[in-house]
Amino acid sequence: MLADLVRKNRSYRRFYQDQAVSEDTLRELVDLARLTPSGRNVQPLRYMLSWTPEMNAQIFPTLAWAGYLTDWQGPEPGEQPAAYIIILGDKTVTPNFGVDPGITAQTILLGATEKGLGGCIVATVQRVRMTELLKIPERYEILLVLALGVPKEEVVVETVGESGDIKYWRDEAHVHHVPKRKLEDIILKF
Amino acid sequence: MLADLVRKNRSYRRFYQDQAVSEDTLRELVDLARLTPSGRNVQPLRYMLSWTPEMNAQIFPTLAWAGYLTDWQGPEPGEQPAAYIIILGDKTVTPNFGVDPGITAQTILLGATEKGLGGCIVATVQRVRMTELLKIPERYEILLVLALGVPKEEVVVETVGESGDIKYWRDEAHVHHVPKRKLEDIILKF
């Protein structure tokens, strides 16, 4: 059931780095994204795949991790993502990528979850640096990076408490806690 | 399998209008969206539900349909959506809703597909008119409208041809054709 996948699809930031994700798996995930809705069906998104330790090592330092965990600089060697899908927008197709990036990112992550993988949408990217390192032509804008791998952490969903604080946090056992708003707080009635 | 849901989840614009969608169903769909990733986990999205003929009738005239079908003004009475989920952004939470709207819209539509429903993401909305009609407080920005119902049309996915034309089109039998780009055209190699 989709609800199980949605529940299981947490944002994972620590991985079994030595458990590789194959190019074929990444291609299957992009093939899912290929069939999703696109504003005016212009399909402006493009994808770069990374599954080798060499290319992964180039991508990793351009990404920022878990802003709320100020004492954590991101996954250590050995726990870094085993693969990436970089979502680019082709500016020669449209200047406005609308809601396509969110649609495809979520679809890919649900697909990854179904395959026993997990991942994280990274939006804070050193774009100039990544563009140079990966020699991305000027027509493409870096929109999102999906970090992927076999998750090596536990993530639990909780309910936002009285304080209204939505910041995720990690306990002493390194379990990652994510407060989500209640259904009655997000459905509006006027 | 997710791939089946993704394939089945087409943008439908004609519905069995008399086949109602219950409030409970809409709430279940929003509950799926509730558990999706949100940038910095701020969860700024809010949802208004419409499932009554009266409220549906208010919403329908504020929406634009299928821009490429210039000789079609949208679904006729009897084929209009049986329900809507209006996705709003709470500007007091954040001014930037990031990719959250696409994530939640796709999740809701996949959930609707699993329930035998179908829908369409409508981004071209007469926002001022809708705000007035539904008395939406100023703190909320109308982001997307999801039109929902039991689909009353056939939609087929095709491959973009030599011409590169991505415009969807309808044949004489009113079958809706959607050209999608090939996998090799969206995966970039530099």
Image: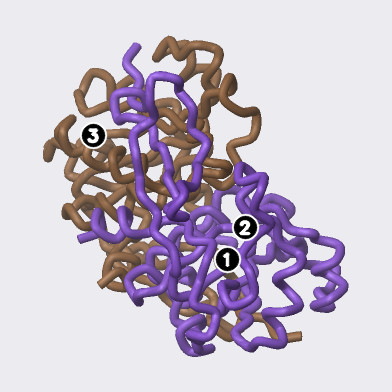
Chain colours: A purple, B brown
A104 versus B69 height, above or below: below
B188 versus B25 height, above or below: below
Residue type of the residue flagged with mark 2: Val
Q: Residue at x 81, y 74 (%)?
A: A136
B118 versus A110 height, above or below: above
Q: Residue at x 32, y 29 (%)?
A: A182
Q: Considering the numbered disc 1 on the image, is that residue within a helix, a strand or a loop? A: strand
The answer to whether marks 1 and 2 mark residues whose Cβ atoms lie closer than 8 Å is yes
Q: Where does the image place residue B151, in percent across and percent down from the top left? A: 23, 52
Q: Residue at x 36, y 40 (%)?
A: B34
Q: Where does the image place residue B130, in percent across and percent down from the top left? A: 46, 20
Disc assigned to residue A122 = 2
Q: Where does the image place residue B74, in percent across and percent down from the top left? A: 38, 41
Q: Where does the image place residue B189, in percent across and percent down from the top left? A: 70, 86
Q: Chain of mark 3?
A: B
Q: Visible in this render: residue B126?
A: no
Disc 3 designates what residue? Answer: B27
Q: Give the residue at the far front of this rendering.
A: A172
Q: Using residue B25 as the reference point, say whether residue B126 is left or right of it.
A: right
Disc 1 designates what residue? Answer: A146
